[in-house]
Amino acid sequence: MATSSQDSSSSKRHFHWTNKVATEDTEASSTTPNEDDKNGRSGIKTHVSLSTPRKKKLPAAAVSIARLRSAVSSFRKSRSSLPFGLGSRVIGTLFGCRRGHVHFALQKEAGSPPAFLVELATPISGLVREMASGLVRIALECDKPKAEDHNKKGTTVVRLLEETTWRTYCNGKKCGFATRRDCGDREWKILKAVEPISTGAGVLPAGNEVEAGPDGGELMYMRAKFERIVGSRDSEAFYMMNPDSNGTPELSIYLLRV
């Protein structure tokens, strides 16, 4: 009997304690909180304020996208200084020594570096004779990359103006090969010498500004504005704009990747 009475008393105590806890919870949720509730809320606020300064780690995908955007923006800034952004009107210059080969340069503006500079196997004297007889069509052809090379990882298709070797045809006749050249000091001096000339042809004597070629002699040049037509990434055409030709270009140059 004594044991049962002790159990009943302990259960009653437990029952009263749970009621007391429930009553305190009810009072804590009321509009007039007591001091304990205030301390509890202040503790919660302190805990939240301590956890907020922690920075959330960005997912790996977000970091990769951010890096990609920064790389693209830096590439666009560096690309703006490159001469490959040609428009629909360019400046073309053909030059070479009397007994030398033809050099052909394309510039976006008169004082800009050449975006395209090739040396043709055709002698400058032969080109002059062809132009004196009538219209001249020069076609430069290069090969497309093979399918297996194109599918390899890490290989990219170069721009048409960046191709290095071309087969040359003048009015349908094969005239050897053309090779892409870098603009050296001699080529740059020639382009600077003819920079004030917008349209015209003539002879530059060898002097301080223009050095004589390997075979010596005077340097012949022809300079004009060309209209640029882009057919695709594998074909471009440049038509010389001559106001005295009644709308018919005397010289047309085609770049083809076949």
Image (cartoon, rainbow, N blue to C red):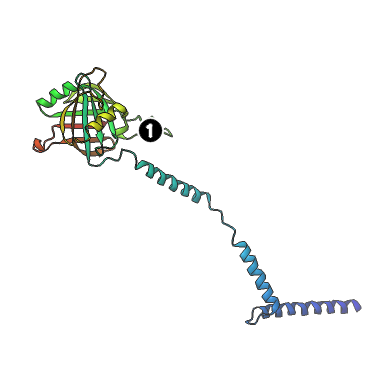
Specify the quadrant of the image occupied by residue 91.
top left
Question: Between residues 117 and 187, which one lies in front from this camera angle?
Answer: 187
Q: Which residue is mark 1?
A: 150
The x and y percentages for residue 106 are 25, 34
Q: How many marks?
A: 1
Residue 111 lies in quadrant: top left
Residue at image x 65%, y 69%?
44
Q: Quadrant of residue 197?
A: top left
Q: Nearer the viewer, residue 65 or 197?
A: 197
Judging from the image, what secondary structure is the residue with disc 1 in? helix
Q: Tag 1: residue type?
A: His
Q: Is residue 7 above or below residue 143?
A: below
Q: Residue furthest right?
A: 2
Left or right: 39 in relation to 140: right
Query: Residue 119: x, y in percent?
Result: 26, 25
| Above-or-below relation of 176 to 64 | above
Residue furthest top as drawn? 215
Which residue reaches farthest bottom?
A: 32
Residue 254: x and y, percent?
Answer: 22, 32
Foreground of the two, 218 or 128: 218
Residue 180 seen in this snapshot = no
Q: Measuring from the top left, give residue 26's x and y in whole percent.
A: 67, 80
Residue in front for this viewpoint, 149 or 89: 89
Judge left or right: residue 184 versus residue 15. left
Does residue 210 lie above or below 154 as drawn? above
Task: Using a 10 Å C-alpha cutoff, classify the residue at mark 1 as few (fewer than 14 neighbours), some (14 to 19) or many (20 or more).
Answer: few
What residue lies at 42% left-to-right and 32% top-to-bottom? 152
| 182 lies left or right of 129 | right
Quadrant (top left/top right/bottom left/bottom right) for the N terminus: bottom right
Drawn side of residue 118 relative to residue 223, left or right? right
